[in-house]
Amino acid sequence: MRLLLTFIICLLVGQSLTVGFGLLVERYSTPYTGLVSFIASYFAMFWLAWLLAVRITAPRSRVAAE
């Protein structure tokens, strides 16, 4: 359950950054370029959020904790 909640939080933060990135690219370039960069970063964010959530919730070994 902790992994899922961490993933959702990371995904919400990441997708907010993705929307901002897409709008920023669209402002300084064409709308098509903004859309393409948004879609690419939108799907990449799912993968990155999962990797980050797994890394955050990974169990620590007892030797490393001491």
Image: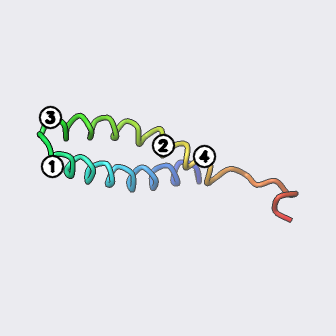
Q: Amino acid at mark 4?
A: Val
Dot placed on the residue nearer the N-terminal end, 1 or 4: 1
Q: Position of residue 53 (x, y in %)?
A: 55, 49
Q: Position of residue 1 (x, y in %)?
A: 58, 50
> On residue 32, which mark appears?
3
Residue pictured at 34% horizontal, 40% vertical: 41
Does the CB distance between marks 1 and 4 fall below 8 Å?
no
Q: Secondary structure at mark 4?
A: helix
Describe the colour scheme in one phrase. rainbow
Q: Position of residue 2 (x, y in %)?
A: 59, 54
Q: Nearer the viewer, mark 4 or mark 3?
A: 3
Q: Secondary structure at mark 3?
A: helix
Image height of 45 relative to 2, above or below: above
Q: Which residue is mark 2?
A: 48
Query: Label 4 crowding class (10 Å Cα cut-off): few <14, some 14-19, many 20+?
Result: some
Q: Which residue is mark 4?
A: 54
Task: State how far apart marks 2 and 4 are (Cα).
Answer: 10 Å
Task: State how far apart marks 1 and 4 are (Cα).
Answer: 35 Å
